[in-house]
Amino acid sequence: MSPSNLPGANLPVPDPALADLLTERLAIVEERLRDAVTHTDELADTASRHLVNAGGKRLRPLLTLLCAQLGDGARPEVIDAAVVVELTHLATLYHDDVMDSAPMRRGAPAAHEVWGNSVAILTGDLLFARASVTVAGLGPDAVRVQAQTFERLCLGQLHETVGPAAGEDAVAHYLQVLADKTASLLATSALFGARMAGCPEQVARVVAAYGEKLGVAFQLADDVIDLTSVGAVTGKTPGTDLREQVPTMPTLLLRARVAEGRGTADDAALVALLDADLTSDESLARAVAALASHEVVDETRALAARLATEAVDEIASLPPGPVRDALTSFAQSLVERAA
């Protein structure tokens, strides 16, 4: 795999020397990932390689490697930590796609479409196991952080599945789901990078706070992308969340308008459309087009941008230089991307 084709290689890193270094380190992580998902059992091997081979942005290991440059980024523990966070992320994707009935992932059929739900879930479990083996070599503190992150990932998925309690604000509930389900692992990715590189604990806490804000901003940007980008670019079917009645920020903002009496007749009609049968591609396309042109999408985009700015504010105490500049660009790129 050439440097220009590496996952994450197209993300803006202002300093060329740092960009080259991260690309080299990411290539090592990619190699280690492929080794980590190798099994002697043929089915386990093929299913475990499915999403690794499909590619991806590798945002989490890239964040680990980047934050490690605040200390001794050459320590071997940094690579191990980067592998752990990506294995954990990949494991959640196998599970998420089953729960969301997502037909595509990274431009390829989702694992459950190829092998069925049970194999997909068990493959995710296998990847969690491999992540656990690797993190065990990083010491008890790393194991504790990984366990706490895993707990938050499960809670985020659980709360997304059951929805808000009676009387609970649906938007606030959703933001907490995003914090647990997405932001927790980005925060851990940054934390691991700083800690494994021997940074002071205050630096580790600063970048973890950055990762937490960035994770919510990232997922809100995904909500926008799901409505405004084409599947050939994202590798996912546009509007899958709408079809499966999975809440997203634009739909929640629209429903809040109507429920609070702030919506128009057109808003109420759009909610009715979203609640209708979206099984056919034609009906789903109508719903996606109608929601994509609504101003709640701009509101979601603005909220993502605000949280990205808050993430950058978290790292203001870091020493100025290429790493802080790259973290700033990293945040901006995640909310401005088209896929």
Image (spheres, grey):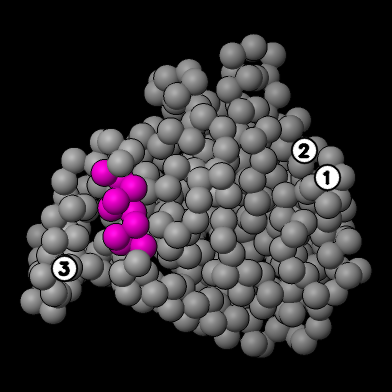
Magenta stretch, residue numbers:
283-292
Marks 3 and 2, Cα distance to the nearest angstrom? 52 Å
Q: Are marks 2 and 1 in contact (CB under 8 Å)?
A: yes
Q: Which badge, 3 or 1, is on the more N-terminal residue?
A: 1
> As rendered, which of 257 and 136 lies closer to the eye?
257
Q: Which residue is mark 2?
A: 32
Residue type, numbered disc 1 = Ile
**155 over 222 or under it: above or below:** above
**37 over 288 or under it: above or below:** above
Residue type, numbered disc 2 = Arg
Q: Which badge, 3 or 2, is on the more N-terminal residue?
A: 2
Residue 56 in percent (x, y) is at: 64, 46
Q: Which residue is mark 3?
A: 266
> As rendered, which of 27 and 262 lies closer to the eye?
262
Q: Main secondary structure of the magenta part?
A: helix
Residue at figure coordinates x 56%, y 32% from the top left: 108
**333 over 239 or under it: above or below:** below
Q: Quadrant of the N terminus?
A: top right
**Mark 3: secondary structure:** helix
Marks 3 and 1, Cα distance to the nearest angstrom? 53 Å
Marks 2 and 1, Cα distance to the nearest angstrom? 6 Å
* Left or right relative to 338: residue 323: right
